[in-house]
Amino acid sequence: MIYIAIPFYYILMLLCVYKENKLLHSSHSNRYIKKTQKRMLLALILFISLVCAFRSVQKTPDTAVYYNLYTAVWKITSIKSFFQSSHNVELGFEFFSKFIKLFFPNYRLYFFIITFTILALSASAIFELTDNRILSYFIFFSVFGFYYTFIVIRQGLAMAIILYTLAKTCKRQSHCYIKFIIGVLIATFFHSTAIISILMLPFINRKRKLKLIYYVFLITISLLLTYTGIVSNFIAKFAVMFFNLIPSGLVSYKIITYFVDFVPTFNSSSYLYIFTFMLVVFFLSDKRKYSKSFIPLLSIQNIGILLLGIFSGISESIRIADYFLMAESCTISDNALRVKIRIKSTK
């Protein structure tokens, strides 16, 4: 079923992107456009959530693990059993799963609700951050959505919470630091790697002026970490030491294991990531034409590109960079528009 549904889903998303593009260049009111975008997003999310619910338990990676936990391990016979942790996963994810099981014991409904929650939170964030909502959703699903809704669902939930928190704090700046920290803590209870998102904290305030010092600093660090194995080794060892100092009850072993076998290597992918990073910094950082929430997203995206260059070829550690790279979903369409404007201005 999935092999037929996924290609069809991509065609459906592309048709929705085409429809959105026509709407954005039409004379319709903003209210009508937003209403149409909401309907398309809801239809897209419901469709893929249904597909996800009926995926193969044995053939889809990680699915058998969650199936076993939901059907056999998480038994709810009393209030005490509900609050008694199995210590198999993070507490937030387990209690969220148990809450679903109270009302929907069928595991297919469980996978449907998990997928719907991830994509609905992500789509809500996208709706806040950009006008190109369907295009941004298409980018999100293509780069992150499939992997983090069908396979790595705990981190998928954590990433969705971070993106949603990011959207709310960027749009509504009152008490933004406190709200963002709360969001990061909630996400950490679904997947402990979400604690890395605390690095976004300096960039969520739109009033902060980063300018040249910020970019020079990031470029210098990126070059050091990419070209110098000694520096990369030092960072990896420091990360392991730091996370070992934190009580295991707060941060699980996952972040440590992402770094403990870290052997920095340099390959052609690193050149690509560093080139992309510099392109974003120097060519696409004109602030005059962007919305107020774009600059924090651009800064966070730059950190993701930087980490991607450092972790090039290390699949597990790249998952840490993905928290920051989610910002690409809401910036890439504006970046493309900026390139178009600049090309036209040079003619």
Image (cartoon, grey):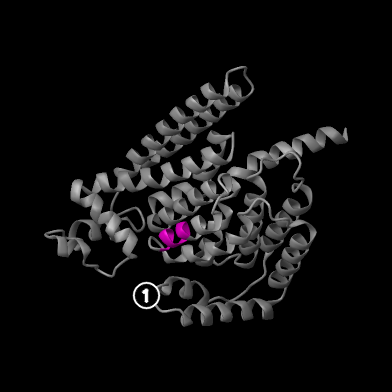
Q: Is residue 221 above or below residue 119?
A: below
The quadrant of the rendering that contains the N terminus is top left
Q: Report the magenta residues as a range.
A: 182-188
Give the residue at x 39% y 39%: 48
**Residue 291 % position (x, y):** 66, 40
Q: Is residue 61 above or below residue 12?
A: below
In front here: 144 or 204? 204
Q: Main secondary structure of the magenta part?
A: helix
Q: Residue furthest front?
A: 174
Name which residue type carries label 1. Gly
So how many labels did they put on this image?
A: 1
The local secondary structure at tag 1 comes to: loop
Q: Is residue 307 visible?
A: yes
**Residue 240 % position (x, y):** 52, 79
Give the residue at x 37% y 35%: 47
**Residue 244 % position (x, y):** 47, 81
Q: Is residue 187 above or below residue 242?
A: above
> In the image, 151: left or right of 321?
left
Q: Which residue is mark 1?
A: 249
